[in-house]
Image (tube, rainbow, N blue to C red):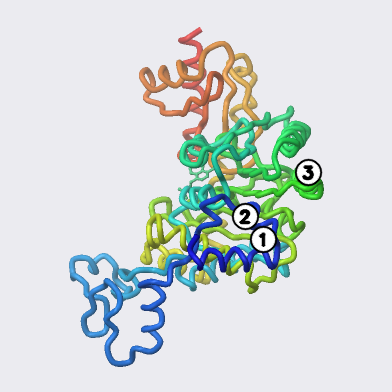
Amino acid sequence: MNPLAVELNEAIAAVNPHVLEMLSDMGKSLYFPKGILSQSGEAKKKATKYNATIGTALENGMAMSLPSVMAPLAGLTPNEALLYAPSDGVLDVRDAWREKLLHDNPALVGKAMSLPLVTNGLTHGLALLGDLFVDEGDILLLPDKIWGNYRLILELRRGADIRQFPFFDGDGFNIDAFKAALAAACAERSKVVVLLNFPNNPTGYAPTEAEGEAIAEALIEAAEGGTNIVAITDDAYFGLFYGEEVMKQSLFTKLAGVHPRLLAVKADAATKEVYVWGLRVGFLTYSIAGADADGPLYEALMKKTGGCVRGMISNCSRLSQKIVCDALLSDSFYEQRAAKVAAMEARALEVKRVLADPKFAEAWTPYPFNSGYFMCLKVNGVSAEDLRVRLLDAYGVGTIAIGETDLRIAFSCLEVEQVQDLFDLCLQAWNDLR
Ligand SMILES: Cc1ncc(COP(=O)(O)O)c(C=O)c1O
């Protein structure tokens, strides 16, 4: 093992040995190299005459650039737009995201957590967590309603042993099934990775405050029972909450800093929250009881995670980070965001209004939804895939079939006035197949 990795492991174990136990073999071996990056960092401070360290091209003290590249980037300097970013991200955007986390989740104020580390979107954040915390055969607890890419990211790439529990119990989150699945996993293993995604893809459900509380209690109880828990919240659709009942802060607020055997990891992204899907800016934030915000444990975890970024993609787009950072720091960011949330909520409410019509009752049952981009129909009598294909071929309507029965509708892509027609066409297609 590289001596730098040994140093980081010792730093982690000195604060909390359970965190070292949670790391995968790769996680234990990871370190942040002292090669070009640190030598160049040193040169940045001390090389006052010539800095010939890093593989960028400079001209007149600025990044060399082609006018054709800079033309659409009016207002940005070549340095802001084109230079490499640090592997753990540009400090300004990390600070700005942290401020946004605190603004949106006031329960985090005063809690010790790491600075968010920049990832190339949330997918990349989850892949990093897989490398850091999942070994072949490690249990990964998921509900039975998931974003299918978890399988590629964590099962295929890292060999996670996925265990699933039924997501719904009637109109709400199935807390009993979650607890039972968690207890069974803890009885088998000394470490369990739990990944929960609210607002959920594909169903568009997020827990109520009481459900969130019960989920957190179950995880804390598991940690108290002596199992090391890595609890990842996938907050991809955070902020898109509709109605009074739904919990408005991240589940992460209830898991951060609560127990020394419970490592809470917030995986989130500007992707959906800032409406910048292709810019690829995501974040990872860690929190565990007993570690100081600026202390050695988070520093070591950040170095390992940054080392993992370095070895995978080197660093994330500086231009994307700059765009997101400027948006977050804009005076009207929260106002602009609220307008978009209101537009999405209007669509969700229209879906609810339309689906309340009893004419649909025989064809499907909608799963409960209160958040996010999607809702799902549990289709009766015909296969979801047959319905999808019929909708597409006969009516030019695209939807997503998941498993035998579920049809996912991204109402995020529909204008309010298109909702009625879409569900009418769904019913027509369903009738065609009957
Ligand atoms: C639940 C969930 N997590 C993560 C992602 C990936 O987000 P990103 O585009 O930032 O990688 C998605 C995107 O569809 C998602 O639905």
Q: Amino acid at mark 2?
A: Val
Percent from the top left, x then y, of residue 26? 51, 52
How much space separates mark 2 and mark 3, taking CA atoms?
17 Å
| Front residue (pair 182, 135) | 135
Q: Which residue is mark 2?
A: 265
How much space separates mark 3 and mark 1, taking CA atoms?
18 Å
Q: Is residue 306 left or right of residue 250?
A: left
Q: Which residue is mark 1?
A: 287
State the SS at label 2: strand
Residue 172 appears in the rendering: no
State the SS at label 3: helix
Beta carbon of the mark 3 residue lies under 8 A of ligand 1 = no
Number of residues whose C-alpha sits closer than 10 Å to that of mark 1, classed few (under 14), some (14–19) or many (20 or more): many
Question: Who comes first in sequence, dot 2 or dot 3?
Answer: 3
Q: Is residue 352 left or right of residue 1?
A: right
Question: Who comes first in sequence, dot 3 or dot 1?
Answer: 3
Q: Are marks 1 and 2 in contact (CB under 8 Å)?
A: yes
Q: Which residue is mark 3?
A: 218
State the SS at label 1: strand
Q: Amino acid at mark 1?
A: Ser
Percent from the top left, x then y, of residue 13? 67, 63
Q: Are marks 2 and 3 in contact (CB under 8 Å)?
A: no
Can you name the residue that lies furthest to the bottom here? Answer: 49
Q: Amino acid at mark 3?
A: Ala
